[in-house]
Image (spheres, grey):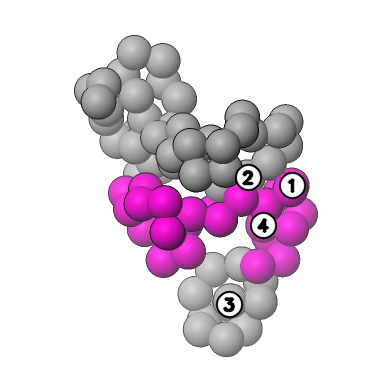
Amino acid sequence: MAETFIDKYGNRRFKNSGKKVSRWVATKKMGRPLKSGEVVHHKDRDKSNNSRSNLWVFKNQDEHTKTHKKDKKKTGYW
């Protein structure tokens, strides 16, 4: 696999392209490229955990934000 680095937000990215590893893993999991606007979510909130089972893909940022709001009510964490 290509070399990676952690950006200032905690996301792992490929050095050669700057693209997020989580988005690459999600494309492999889904068997298709991500659509414009789709957002990759880390179930455990650990941006360094890019395992296939830890990633969800939301159709847009609004859907992603709704999940964080629901989780905050349950857990107190955004």
Kind of element beneath mark 3: helix
Q: CA distance from mark 1 to mark 4?
A: 7 Å
Q: Residue furthest bottom?
A: 74
Q: Amino acid at mark 2?
A: Val
Cβ atoms at labels 1 and 4 below 8 Å apart: yes
Q: CA distance from mark 3 to mark 1?
A: 19 Å
Query: Which badge, 3 or 1, comes first in the chain's sequence?
Result: 1
Q: CA distance from mark 3 to mark 4?
A: 13 Å
Label 3: which residue? 72
Q: Amino acid at mark 3?
A: Lys
Mark 1: few/some/many CA within 10 Å (<14, 14-19, 20+): some
Q: CA distance from mark 1 to mark 2?
A: 6 Å
Query: From the viewer's perspective, is 21 left or right of 34?
Result: left
Kind of element beneath mark 1: loop
Label annotation for residue 60: 1
**x and y percentages locating residue 23 in the rendered image:** 50, 37
**x and y percentages locating residue 65 in the rendered image:** 68, 60
Label 4: which residue? 64
Mark 3: few/some/many CA within 10 Å (<14, 14-19, 20+): few
Q: Quadrant of the N terminus?
A: top left
Mark 3 or 4: in front is 4
Whether 12 is drawn above or below 16: the answer is below
- Residue 78 image-quadrant placement: bottom right
Whether 10 is drawn above or below 46: the answer is above
Mark 3 or 1: in front is 1
Mark 2 or 3: in front is 2
Kind of element beneath mark 2: strand
Query: Which badge, 1 or 2, comes first in the chain's sequence?
Result: 2
Q: Is residue 47 visible?
A: no
Label 2: which residue? 39
Cβ atoms at labels 1 and 2 below 8 Å apart: yes
Give the magenta range: 41-67
